[in-house]
Amino acid sequence: MSKSSPTSFGEFMSSLEAYSIIDFDESLGQLLRIQSSSKDFGTIMASGKSALPYVIWLVDGMNMSNKLIVHLNSDEEVLNQITQKLMETDIRITSHCQDQKEFTTDISEHRMDLLLLTEDALPVIDYWMKLLSDTGILVLIATPETRLNLMQKYSDGYFCFDKEYLFISRKGSDHNKVRKRSKRRKATNSP
């Protein structure tokens, strides 16, 4: 734990270690803290037990206008209780234990400005992608093969950047129009 770690990070990680949640990358934590600080009036979501170590970092970067939703699967109630203990006094944080497909369907009308997902989100990744706001960013903690597959799948409508984690954001509608116009020009100008 470095000097720049959030105050309650060590205590929270100790609680998670009892459930074998020990993987953590401080550079990703720092990046997520910066991202959450840039989302005024933004909605931030962390889903999956491997995302839990980063919750403290997200909260540390949030301002008072942000909201953080922590999502865990319905069989992870014990981890949800640990998360709820963390947020007893923070009105910006809520948590839910629910099947991912059911949860993403229930909140389908909402848009997220920052989504932190883990590999267990893959079966319903299309549902998660629909929740991303126009200026939002999705961060995925996954294996290199999984990240490559998703980059290939989503590269037409999204910007994708893979640097140990996959970062995805929507291409603006103006960007898509320009690309289509450019393709049409090439097609009509070719011999």
Image (cartoon, rainbow, N blue to C red):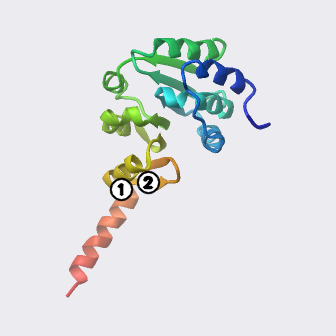
Residue in view at x 67 percent, y 35 percent: 61
Residue marked by disc 2: 160
Q: Can residue 66 be seen in this view?
A: no
Task: Choose between 153 and 136: the one closer to the eye.
Answer: 153
Residue marked by disc 1: 155
Crowd class of label 2 (few under 14; some 14 to 19; many from 20; radius 10 Å): many
Q: Where does the N terminus fall, quadrant-wise?
A: top right
Task: Report whether 113 appears left or right of 8.
Answer: left
Image height of 42 relative to 34, above or below: above
Amino acid beneath label 1: Ser
Mark 2 in CB contact with mark 1 (< 8 angstroms): yes
Task: Report whether 19 appears left or right of 178.
Answer: right
Residue in view at x 41 percent, y 36 percent: 119
Residue in view at x 32 percent, y 72 percent: 182
Q: Which residue of the protein is positioned furthest toward the right in this rendering?
A: 3
Residue in view at x 51 percent, y 24 percent: 69
Give the quadrant of residue 189. bottom left
Q: Where does the C terminus fall, quadrant-wise?
A: bottom left
Disc 2/disc 1 C-alpha distance (Å): 6 Å
Task: Choose between 59 and 183: the one closer to the eye.
Answer: 59
Give the quadrant of residue 109. top left
Residue 21 image offset from top left, x and y in percent: 55, 26
Q: Is residue 96 visible?
A: yes
Mark 2 or mark 1, earlier in chain:
1
